Image (spheres, coloured by chain):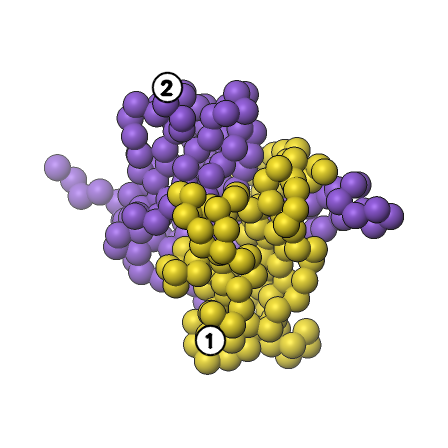
Chain colours: A yellow, B purple
Amino acid sequence: MALIPTLTIKDTTTFSDEINFSVTDSLTVAAPAQSLSLETVTATGGNHIIIPAGTAIAYLFVRHTGTTDGSTGTAQLVDLENTDDEAFARLGAGEWLFMPFNHAGASVGVQLQVAHASNVLCEYAYWTKG
Amino acid sequence: MATTTATVSISSSDLQPGNALSLNASSTLMQTGLTTGLELMEMGKGKLTEASAADALHEPLGTANTANWVYICNNATDDTHYMSIGIHEEIIGNLGAGDWMWMPWNMVADGEINIEAEPTGATIPYEYAIFKSTYTLPAKT
């Protein structure tokens, strides 16, 4: 199965020259995978494991919806942690990331945790490298 | 105001029978507080050798809890050559040949980004871009 991710960065206002670049890849992916899903994240990361512990490389997409429930806005930050509780990224409202998660071959997964006591609705998906 | 947008599209025609994937998400890169855009950018490319072990792509010079974004692409053509990506002591990903990543990065005191070529003998061309909130200019010597 093939997955085609494309990143485009654009900026026409900051500098006197325009930033406009795009990169595309073709990834071979396999099971296990998780289709686009929603998770209401709280301050307890262990309750929001979005990739179970495993040693394979997982292509991970996570987006902070900027809401607590799909309609009520929130600016609370969401941490991405491995399941050993080590944080490696923090998303603000509306932000997203795409990365090939792996922890040097150790059997760990990924969990989401709100930095303060609050709910944040996040969208996520992952695909295992084939 | 700086208005830099990052957009991802992820598509697949064969993940699920009869249900093609077509995902799109876009965000404007903002400093902490989400009201001011990022105004510092660093781009470059290089070659990473396995013999040099882990190298810091960027030192942790920023103030804690700043918002920054990093793009890294492994431009190797040998499928066995991958980049190990880490933040300080924590390995967070393996970037295969041709693969890219985009993620936020918090430049805390000990949070440098590390990159390392694998396996033994590998030389990996790579490119990167870092969008930063703040940067302290070096003192005059």
Q: Which residue is at the front of the view, A100 or B46?
A: A100
Give the image location of residue A2, x and y in percent: 71, 37
Callout 2: chain: B
Q: Which residue is at the front of the view, A81 or A117?
A: A81
> Which is in the foreground here, disc 2 or disc 1?
2
Q: Is B52 situated left or right of A17 in this image?
A: left
What is the quadrant of residue B32 in the picture? bottom left
Q: Give the residue at x 46% y 30%.
A: B82
Q: Residue furthest right?
A: B18
Q: Give the residue at x 40% y 21%.
A: B122
Looking at the figure, which quarter contains the C terminus of chain B? top left
Give the image location of residue A127, x and y in percent: 63, 47
Give the image location of residue A42, x and y in percent: 51, 75
| Amino acid identity at mark 2 | Gly
- Identify the secondary structure beneath mark 1: loop
Q: CA distance from mark 2 to mark 1?
A: 44 Å
Image mark for residue B121: 2
Callout 1: chain: A
Q: Dot 2, how many residues are within 10 Å of its Cα: few (below 14), some (14-19), or many (20+)?
A: few
Q: Give the residue at x 70% y 55%.
A: A35
Q: Dot 1, how many residues are within 10 Å of its Cα: few (below 14), some (14-19), or many (20+)?
A: some
Q: Is residue A33 above or below residue B33?
A: above
Same chain under badges 2 and 1? The reply is: no
Image mark for residue A43: 1
- Residue B47 seen by the camera: no
